[in-house]
Image (spheres, helix red, strand yellow):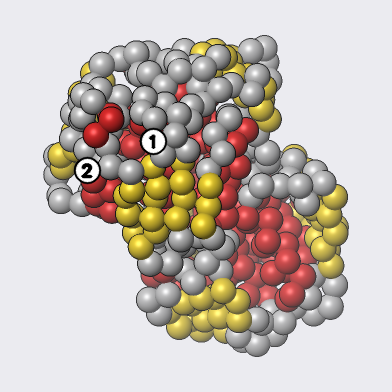
């Protein structure tokens, strides 16, 4: 433990910091890791997945696949795994799955199991049971799925029955709301090749309302294409999975570094002088959160990149901006903390989806930013942050939300001590975060 940080089981004390410099190798993307695991499980043939994220959400997906009879074997000492594809079948005809607070596991598995022909129960932690799933369930029922709520209507836990015995009668169009969570659209799309492989007709998903977090759906369609299923799009209004589409292993696939996690280190470089470089993600990324780097540059940071790296350092003095964050909902949380270091207010819009994440992130961010001396105005779909006239040391409540814990570590660059409560919540996506942060931040 360095002098910059002291910890106990329930909190981590971070000392004031003044400058930053270093290189960080990013862990694998959570979004890509869990999508890839499921697609590989549904594909014909075995797939070697390289660079899989080592974190709780991915552990929950792997546990679930094991209970469903799908073998995932580690290969060597690296984070490389072989997934034995089942060609669209689920070997276990009954299972009870506990998926923690992993939306990237629970929602796609709900959709896939709806067409698996077995009896399954899906549950999670208390917060997961407060995160809506009704729009996805309604769409799946529209395709003939048999799904019951075991608790509150519209929320997990769920019981999934065998569903239609004959997929030939499945409707060829289904509608799903797009304005609550893009995971509903992604889940539907990933599951539909189970249906189209058994029938000689396409299925079209129509989006009701505006689709939020479009880049995450783009990740889904990109990965589906790598597994042999090309989704036809009419803009962001509808998606068509062709007749007879089925997944086939690409043989090997590498998981990109996590672009959301990159945001903390790029922000540290912009605030603390830098340069701070992240590797594993860059211009060639399929993740929308790489656009965080563009937002940093708009505020005044000096940002540079290559195909597999991005680097940020101080440029001109950071200026407050107004920015639509609908395409970068996770990285937008980091922007809210960067706003503490800017001249003038920063307003983030397009963040309504924050309210149905690991916690109500709009309320949580407003409360914790205020502790540091900021003036914060929160709305249903926006957050305005006026930087502190005087910084205040703070104890940050993390609400069992990994991203709150990580982004508020940056506040130490304001020259104040910060106590992070429940620091182990970062285990959800980045268990080694605080060690990596200490390596680039100089006391």
Q: Distance between the Cα atoms at labels 1 and 2?
A: 19 Å
Nearer-N-terminus badge (1/2): 2
Residue at x 20% of width, y 30% of height: 163
Position of the C terminus, as image quadrant, is bottom right
**Residue 75 visible in image:** yes
Q: Secondary structure at mark 2?
A: helix
Position of the N terminus, as image quadrant, is top right
Between 169 and 293, the one lying in front of the other is 169
Quadrant hosting residue 210: bottom left
Residue 415 picture location, percent across and down: 69, 69
Q: Is residue 79 left or right of residue 7?
A: right
Quadrant hosting residue 83: top right
Residue 364 picture location, percent across and down: 41, 66
Dot 1 surroundings within 10 Å: few (below 14), some, or many (20 or more)?
Answer: some
Between 389 and 33, the one lying in front of the other is 33
- Can you say whether 225 is above or below 238 in the image? above
Residue at x 69% of width, y 69% of height: 295
Dot 2 surroundings within 10 Å: few (below 14), some, or many (20 or more)?
Answer: some
Residue 408 picture location, percent across and down: 57, 61
Residue at which label 1 appears? 201
Residue 84 picture location, percent across and down: 51, 13
Residue at which label 2 appears? 141
């Amino acid at each position: 433990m360095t002098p910059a940080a002291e910890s106990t089981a329930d909190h981590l004390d971070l000392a004031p910091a003044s400058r930053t410099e270093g290189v960080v190798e990013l862990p694998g993307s959570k979004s890509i890791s869990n999508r890839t695991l499921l697609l590989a499980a549904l594909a014909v043939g075995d797939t070697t997945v390289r660079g899989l994220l080592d974190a709780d959400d991915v552990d929950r997906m792997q546990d679930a696949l094991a209970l469903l009879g799908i073998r995932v074997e580690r290969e060597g000492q690296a984070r490389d795994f072989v997934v034995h594809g089942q060609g669209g079948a689920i070997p276990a005809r009954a299972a009870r799955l506990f998926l923690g607070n992993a939306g990237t596991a629970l929602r796609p598995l709900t959709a896939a199991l709806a067409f698996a022909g077995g009896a399954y129960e899906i549950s999670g932690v208390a917060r997961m049971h407060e995160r809506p799933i009704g729009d996805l369930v309604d769409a799946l029922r529209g395709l003939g799925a048999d799904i019951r709520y075991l608790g509150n209507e519209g929320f997990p836990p769920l019981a999934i029955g065998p569903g239609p015995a004959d997929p030939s009668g499945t409707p060829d169009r289904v509608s799903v709301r797009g304005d609550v969570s893009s995971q509903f659209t992604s889940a539907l799309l990933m599951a539909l090749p189970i249906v189209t492989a058994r029938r000689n007709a396409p299925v079209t998903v129509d989006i009701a309302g505006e689709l939020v977090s479009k880049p995450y759906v783009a990740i889904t369609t990109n990965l589906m294409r790598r597994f042999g299923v090309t989704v036809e799009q009419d803009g962001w209004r509808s998606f068509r999975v062709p007749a007879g589409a089925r997944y086939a292993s690409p043989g090997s696939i590498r998981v990109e570094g996590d672009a959301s996690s990159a945001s903390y280190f790029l922000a540290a470089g912009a605030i603390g002088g830098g340069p701070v470089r992240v590797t594993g993600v860059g211009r060639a990324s399929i993740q929308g959160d790489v656009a965080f780097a563009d937002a940093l540059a708009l505020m005044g940071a000096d940002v540079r990149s290559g195909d597999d790296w991005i680097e940020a350092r101080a440029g001109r003095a950071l200026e407050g901006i107004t920015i639509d964050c609908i395409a970068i909902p996770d990285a937008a949380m980091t922007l809210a903390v960067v706003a503490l270091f800017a001249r003038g207010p920063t307003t983030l819009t397009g963040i309504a989806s924050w309210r149905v994440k690991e916690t109500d992130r709009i309320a949580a961010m407003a409360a914790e930013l205020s502790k540091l001396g900021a003036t914060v105005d929160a709305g249903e779909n926006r957050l305005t942050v006026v930087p502190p006239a005087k910084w205040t040391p703070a104890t940050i409540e993390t609400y069992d939300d990994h991203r709150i814990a990580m982004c508020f570590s940056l506040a130490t660059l304001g020259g104040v001590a910060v106590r992070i409560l429940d620091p182990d919540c970062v285990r959800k996506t980045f268990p080694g975060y605080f060690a990596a942060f200490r390596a680039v931040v100089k006391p």
